[in-house]
Image (cartoon, rainbow, N blue to C red):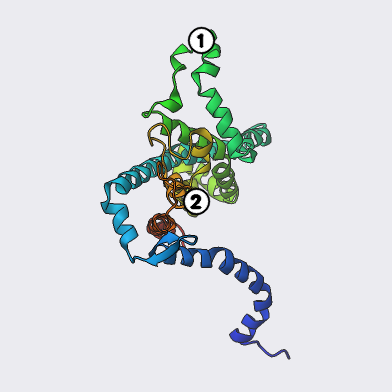
Amino acid sequence: MKKKLTQGQVFLTWLPYLLPALVVYVVFMAWPLLDSLRLSLYTGSAGIGRSLVGFDNFKKLFTVHEYSARYWGAFGHTFYFFLIHMAVQNCLGILFAAILTNRFMRFRIGYQTIIFIPVTLAVLVTGYLWKLLLNPVWSGPFLDKIGLSFLVRPWLGDRTTALTCVAFVSCWQWIGIPTMMFVAALRNISDDYFEAATIEGASSRQIFWRIKLPLIKPVAGMIAILTFVNNFNAFDVVFAMENVNGAPNYATDLIGTLFYRVGIAGQHPVGIPDPGLGAAIATITFLVLCLGVIPTLRATQGKD
């Protein structure tokens, strides 16, 4: 008769398999995070010497107008960027998924491929192509010929439209990911629920709102979390379509571009990076992400 292993022995059995992943996690994720928290308490850089300043970097970020104006502007733009992704990307994603999982739908594989193709393209490539399409010099003559001259305007050069255009381009590129996640979630629902609801006289709309949507709540919550985290770390799409200064006149400045300018490249006109202040921005962003992610996880990933 086999002797039953204790919990400690089971742990030691699995430890050799867990150790490589644990080492990678500590070296490339946990340690950089903790070191960033430590760095936010210092000023200066490794080349010119660092000195401990405590919470002065955080105080400077919120009380000095030069920094606070840029930070709150970038924070507001990032939150607006996130809301557009939630309203456009994720809502269209669940709509497309509902259509693609309809059993009467034809050519669904082709449509799935079309929706997912932009995800496979590099952000710099799609950003540059859309930058050309939104440029009136390049697209103006074509739009005039097809009777859409009202669309000829400098979309990326206007403060009122630049950030919205960048967000829509980002939604267009990444909509394939939530769509495929919703498709997988909807396909995992047993057909017995739908058959029973149909027998009871439920319409397709009622089946979607009262059966499908509640059952895919954990997936919807995870997609919302991924959208939140990715948008508050967004950088490449703004870099590709505008620049790291968030042109025009900081209208597309996000937390990611602000962090890059302050902590890595250096703010204009000085051009000297401040890693401590950049780490303070990263630390605040980490806390904001925790405040958004933890309640969403508790609300959507329940045992029921």
Q: Is residue 95 visible?
A: no
Callout 2 secondary element:
helix
Callout 1 secondary element:
helix
Does 250 appear above or below 187? Answer: above
Is 18 displayed left or right of 243 in the figure? right
Determine the residue positioned at 30% across, 44% down: 69
Quadrant position of the N terminus in the picture: bottom right
Does 194 appear above or below 126? Answer: below
Q: Are marks 2 and 1 in contact (CB under 8 Å)?
A: no
Foreground residue, 57 or 238? 57
Three-letter code, disc 1: Asp
Which of the two discs, 2 and 1, labels the residue nearer the N terminus? Answer: 1
Residue 88: x %, y % from top left: 46, 36
Q: Can residue 208 be seen in this view?
A: yes
Three-letter code, disc 2: Leu
How many numbered discs, if any?
2
Residue at numbered disc 2: 226
Residue 185: x %, y % from top left: 56, 49
Residue at numbered disc 1: 144
Residue 302: x %, y % from top left: 45, 62
Report, in whole angstroms, how far the alpha carbon at label 2 lies from the one at label 1. Answer: 40 Å
